[in-house]
Image (cartoon, helix red, strand yellow):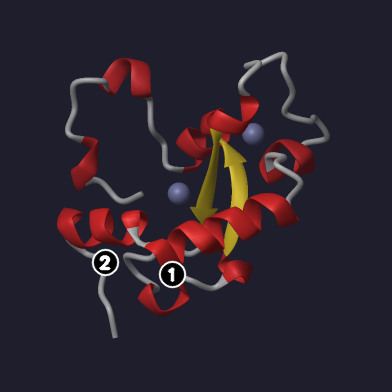
């Protein structure tokens, strides 16, 4: 069973062909829409960013750090905009730009 605990393991995973395929399928499944914005009744649109496709992440609902066996399970993945994704992980890019985010859970 693969593990994704170190930054190197995670980096490898996110670059893997297998993940890229799952990621693509999830984006298509979710119509390239942020699922969290949708739940809150707003649709993530050009209002935030005209290049919205570039501003979407595919998030693991259960972190691969703790649930490595779900890393490639599409049911464990959903599309989030960068803003919601950062909220979910309690991240503040602007303030923590210098911080070494790789060491945190993603
Ligand atoms: Zn969102
Ligand atoms: Zn995430």
The picture places residue 9, in percent across and down from the top left corner, at 21, 62
Look at the numbered disc 2 and say if its residue's Cβ is closer than 8 Å to ligand 2: no
Residue beneath the point at 44% across and 62% down: 19
Q: Disc 2 or 1, which lies upstream in sequence? A: 2
Q: Quadrant of the N terminus?
A: bottom left
- SS at circle 2: loop
87 with respect to 1 (left or right): right
Residue 106 vertical placement versus 42 (above, below): below
Residue 66 vertical placement versus 12 (above, below): below
Q: Nearer the viewer, residue 16 or 2?
A: 16
Residue at label 2?
4
Residue at label 1?
71
Q: Nearer the viewer, residue 85 or 23?
A: 23
The picture places residue 18, in percent across and down from the top left corner, at 44, 67
- SS at circle 1: loop
- Marks 2/1: CA–CA distance: 9 Å
Residue 29 vertical placement versus 42 (above, below): below
The picture places residue 12, in percent across and down from the top left corner, at 25, 59
Mark 2 nearby-residue class (10 Å; few <14, some 14–19, many ≥20): many
Residue 27 vertical placement versus 17 (above, below): above
Residue beneath the point at 46% across and 34% down: 86
Residue beneath the point at 36% across and 23% down: 93
């Amino acid at each position: 069973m693969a593990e994704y605990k170190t930054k190197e393991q995670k980096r490898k995973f996110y670059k893997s062909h297998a993940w890229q395929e799952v990621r693509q399928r999830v984006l298509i499944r979710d119509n390239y829409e942020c699922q969290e914005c949708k739940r809150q009744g707003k649709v993530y649109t050009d209002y935030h960013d005209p290049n919205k496709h570039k501003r979407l992440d595919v998030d693991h609902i259960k972190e691969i750090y703790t649930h490595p066996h779900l890393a490639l399970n599409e049911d464990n993945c959903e599309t989030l905009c960068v803003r919601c994704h950062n909220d979910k992980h309690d991240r503040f890019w602007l303030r923590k730009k210098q911080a070494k985010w790789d060491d945190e859970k993603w």
